[in-house]
Image (tube, grey):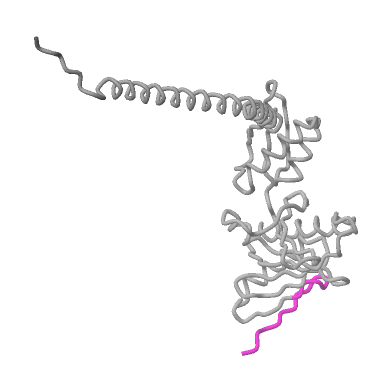
């Protein structure tokens, strides 16, 4: 009879492999469970803070976003002469803070070269600003800061600054008014300064009507106004108003003389004109 032979160690080796595979599965499952626990803990700890941060950020955005939108509807010139976005921002902030329409109009007039400002609430959350831009007639150096040259409009209102923007090139050619009494302690116009500005505007208007170009108008106490004519330059002493007769005499003198030979003309004597020639 033949015998079947069992190779020693065959069955125990198979059992060892199965046992090793089972250990690997248990280790993998344990690691998976551990990672799940860590993820759950992280979610519990971090998620509420994340949600709270998002809620807070959204609330801040809601609060900081302007409620009132500002639009401009101008009939008197472009708003390119100053920072349009800055004006919109300030008016929007003021409106959100509860400022009245009259207060908004005053704010716009103080921030920008606007002579007439009308503000209406076109719709909830929408404000429309109608405006007319000021027309500059003179530059003015008030003497308190020689680096700051401001502008005077045709009504005598002092505003803005000249000439810091490329668009203000034409304004830089306006006559420069100097020598007026210092402004009051608040920086506003004194009554004397206001009166002299009106006289200077009348003088400049009369000169322009006679096509007499000037680069500067200077006021001197007890003597009145002097102008610097171009080309030349020729200094002309004119005095105080009325100016019509003096300017008519000036026009007659200019027709009779060679401007290149004249350095000074004095008209502040009744009915007379004195001419000083240049030294060659």
Would you identify the image quadrant in which residue 61 lies?
top right
Position of 152 relative to 27 (above/below): below
Residue 138: x, y in percent?
70, 58
Position of 280 relative to 1 (above/below): below
- Residue furthest out toward the left: 1
200 within the magenta span? no
Q: Quadrant of the C terminus?
A: bottom right
- Residue furthest out toward the front: 1
Residue 6: x, y in percent?
20, 18
- Could you say which is closer to the camera, residue 140 or residue 4? 4
- Could you say which is closer to the camera, residue 95 or residue 132? 95
269 within the magenta span? yes
**Main secondary structure along the magenta-highlighted residues:** strand
Q: Quadrant of the N terminus?
A: top left
Would you identify the image quadrant in which residue 128 lies?
top right
Residue 129: x, y in percent?
68, 33
- Left or right: where 154 falls relative to 12: right
Would you identify the image quadrant in which residue 237 lies?
bottom right
Q: In the rendered picture of this protein, how many numbered marks are placed on residues? A: 0
Which residue is at a point 82% across and 61% down the rendered structure image? 241
- Could you say which is closer to the camera, residue 25 or residue 213? 25
- Could you say which is closer to the camera, residue 36 or residue 8? 8
Which residue is at a point 71% across and 62% down the rendered structure image? 149
- Residue furthest out toward the bottom: 280
User: Magenta span covers which residues?
Assistant: 266-280
Residue 205: x, y in percent?
71, 56
């Amino acid at each position: 009879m033949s015998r079947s032979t069992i190779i020693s160690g065959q069955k125990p080796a198979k059992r060892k492999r199965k046992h090793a595979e089972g250990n690997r599965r248990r280790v993998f499952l344990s690691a998976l469970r551990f990672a799940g626990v860590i993820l759950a803990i992280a979610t519990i700890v971090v998620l509420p803070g994340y949600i709270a941060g998002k809620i807070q950020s959204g609330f801040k955005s809601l609060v900081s976003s302007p409620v009132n939108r500002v639009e401009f509807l101008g009939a008197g010139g472009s708003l390119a002469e100053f920072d349009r976005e800055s004006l919109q921002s300030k008016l929007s902030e003021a409106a959100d803070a509860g400022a009245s329409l009259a207060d908004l109009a005053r704010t716009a007039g103080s921030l920008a070269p606007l002579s007439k400002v009308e503000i209406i609430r076109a719709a909830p959350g929408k404000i429309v600003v109608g405006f007319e831009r000021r027309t500059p007639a003179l530059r003015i150096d008030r003497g308190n800061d020689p680096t700051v040259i401001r502008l005077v409009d045709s009504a005598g209102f002092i505003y803005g600054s000249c000439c810091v923007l490329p668009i203000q090139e034409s304004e830089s050619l306006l006559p420069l008014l100097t020598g007026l009494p210092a402004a009051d302690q608040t920086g506003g116009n004194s009554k004397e300064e206001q009166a002299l500005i009106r006289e200077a505007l009348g003088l400049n208007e009369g000169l322009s009507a006679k096509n007499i170009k000037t680069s500067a108008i200077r006021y001197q106490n007890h003597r009145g106004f002097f102008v610097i004519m171009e080309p030349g330059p020729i200094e002309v002493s004119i005095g105080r108003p009325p100016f019509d007769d003096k300017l008519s005499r000036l026009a007659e003198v200019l027709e009779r003389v060679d401007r290149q030979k004249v350095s000074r003309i004095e008209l502040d004597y009744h009915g007379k004109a004195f001419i000083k020639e240049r030294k060659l």
